[in-house]
Image: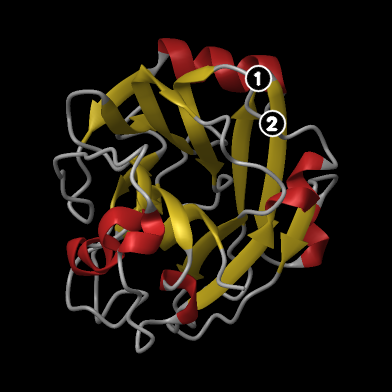
Amino acid sequence: MKTKKLFWLMAIFAMLTVAPSCDKDDDNSNNNGEDPTEDPIDESLPLSLQGTNYYVIQLDETSFSSLGKRVANDLRPNGTTRFLDVWAQGETYSAGTCQGPNAYGEITEWVSLVVVAPDSWSGAGWRITDGVDMTGIDDTYNFHIAIKSPSNQPTAGHTFIFNSDGNEIKLFFGPESEAGSDLWYANYTHDGEWNHFDIPVSTLMEKGYMWENGLNGNVLGVLSGSVAGRELNIDAMFFYKPKK
């Protein structure tokens, strides 16, 4: 893996904004100030959609609509102030193909990217340009992510990076042998099925995760190494307060 300095220099100077075929742009909404308890919660929803105060990075429109006023901030790419950037497009990732239902069983698209990596790296990031206030996220929140891999990729590994006020907080998904010194790791099944993870923000805060200022720049980055053909399939990424 490249050093932190090289990683962020490449992110800045090699960044090209793209709209991958498996991630559509949506208008963003911000319901800060609304009382989420005014919105009745459908108990037939998956448990990860029955919480409150959602900061949504990636989510399909049907599942997003089910949250109603429980959305604190919509951070999904919209092509104007929020973007999914593939760094050095065409040299690191190419667009993948969404097959089957998404993480919540909807027949729709998610983020699917395939490693090209002729130069030993791959990277992308979810970037915000309008100064979103993230200071409401505290140790009562969880970070949710769903990830899957086809059965022919038993060693697929991906590192997710939160840039928290200058600190890089890392989460690794894949075999322990590839995890290195990343903060947190978990393996997942490689059978084409979705794996859901709920990670307490308190775990991230132990390593320096916090938001002291309004966010401009990457709210989340991802690296998938240099194995050509490795697939990154992710969905349902958000911070939220889980149901008690």
Q: Quadrant of the C terminus?
A: bottom right
Q: Is residue 112 visible?
A: no
Numbered label attached to residue 210: 2
Q: Which residue is mark 1?
A: 165
**Placement of 100 over or under 225, stated as above or below:** below
* Residue 56 point in image, percent of width and height: 38, 49
- Residue at 49% in and 83% down: 151
Q: Quadrant of the N terminus?
A: top right
* Residue 15 point in image, percent of width and height: 37, 20
**In the picture provided, is 77 more to the left or to the right than 135?**
left
**Placement of 78 over or under 144, stated as above or below:** above
Distance from disc 2 to disc 1, alpha carbons, whole Å, reads: 7 Å
Dot 2 and dot 1 residues touching (CB under 8 Å):
yes
Under mark 1, the amino acid is Asp
In this picture the colour scheme is: secondary structure
Under mark 2, the amino acid is Met
Instruction: Determine which quarter of the picture holds residue 74.
Output: top left
